[in-house]
Amino acid sequence: MTGTNGEPTPPPGGDGAPGPEAAAALADAVLGEVERAVIGKRPVLELLLTGMLAGGHVIIEDLPGLAKTLMASSLARAAGLSWSRVQFTPDLLPADLTGSTVLEASGASFEFRPGPIFANLVVGDEINRAPPKTQSAMLEAMAEGHVSVDGTTHPLPRPFCVLATQNPVEYEGTYPLPEAQLDRFLLRVSVGYPSPSEEREILERRIGRRQDDVDISPVASLDDVLAARRGIEAVHVAEPVLDYVIALVGATRHAPGVSTGASPRGSLALLKASRVRAALAGRTYVTPDDVKALAVPALAHRLILEPELWVRGARGDEIIGQIVERVPAPSPSDVLTGA
């Protein structure tokens, strides 16, 4: 359907149902608070929030010391969510994540003591340092939304989001995630070095506050986050935009040098993330630019490249960039007509 200004409007979300504006208001408040601690990384922060509001998980892959953990913990505090941090190490056991059943002091019964994975937002530092069995325990929880201990299923809180970090250059003592497990992450994000002016601001702020820690105050609540996630469902996706998503993902399966392209899980990831981006921009409909902006974070880590490309140092980011340039996007008039 089309609004009075010629722009597409979403179908009604039902009486009293939140709209996309709930996500935009949440983002303005939360990101504004987080930027008190994290300087000059607004696009990265928006991607982290996008993953959380889309109901997915995000892996942050970059060098040490670039505030990956600070971003995740600040986001949780500002959004008013429960959060926990797990430092992955080679001796970390699955029970260290999920929790275990212990005998009470009285000896009369057994009691389940939940592990750090029972939080709205779990920060997994250097996930590639844990052995495969422990990685699988976390990835199973990410996929199923619950954990099973001693034959009993324990649901995880809602929302549940994992922000995992990974060092892409230091492989000694690590267990790299297989491509099939990377596919469980909705988005893959890189942080990058700050510019000289941003780095100067980081240092000046540290001098000014006279302490290392930055006090992040909750500016939202669990109910606000849940309302924002419901509001995303009111974002309209026109048929030409849907066809564009399908075309982009389909092109990854036939791209030269790609052994395995993105699966339908990649299509869903790109669709969900694009709807969140539209809502954060204050729109009630998805544009081709939303899809283009999220194609690399949503699809690049899902590709398996042929050995010759891998040896040459080619990356999935480059392949997706070439596909975005090659696949024609619908024009604004097509999007309006489809709506």
Image (cartoon, rainbow, N blue to C red):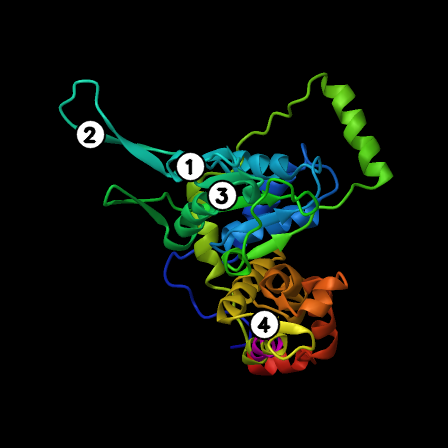
Mark sitting on residue 26: none
Q: Is residue 24 at least partly visible in the picture?
A: no
Q: CA distance from mark 2 to mark 4?
A: 47 Å
Seen at 37% across and 63% down, the residue is 14
| Quadrant holding the C terminus | bottom right
Name the amino acid, label 4. Answer: Gly
Mark sitting on residue 261: 4
Q: Nearer the viewer, mark 2 or mark 1?
A: 1
Q: CA distance from mark 1 to mark 3?
A: 8 Å
Sequence-wise, the earlier of marks 1 and 4 is 1
Q: Is residue 276 left or right of residue 317?
A: left
Q: Which residue is mark 3?
A: 131
Q: Nearer the viewer, residue 173 or 50?
A: 173
* Range covered by the magenta-colored residues: 243-249
Badge 1: residue crowd in 10 Å (few <14, some 14–19, many ≥20): some
Q: Which residue is mark 1?
A: 93
Q: Position of residue 269 (x, y in %)?
A: 53, 63
Q: Nearer the viewer, residue 86 or 84?
A: 86
Label 4: element kind: loop
Compared to residue 55, the image places residue 191 above or below, namely above
Seen at 56% across and 35% down, the residue is 73
Q: Nearer the viewer, mark 2 or mark 3?
A: 3
Q: CA distance from mark 2 to mark 3?
A: 28 Å
Q: Nearer the viewer, mark 3 or mark 4?
A: 3
Label 2: element kind: strand
Is 263 included in the stretch rendered in magenta? no
Sequence-wise, the earlier of marks 2 and 4 is 2
Sequence-wise, the earlier of marks 2 and 1 is 1
Q: CA distance from mark 1 to mark 4?
A: 33 Å
Q: Is residue 87 at least partly visible in the picture?
A: yes
Residue farthest right in this picture: 196
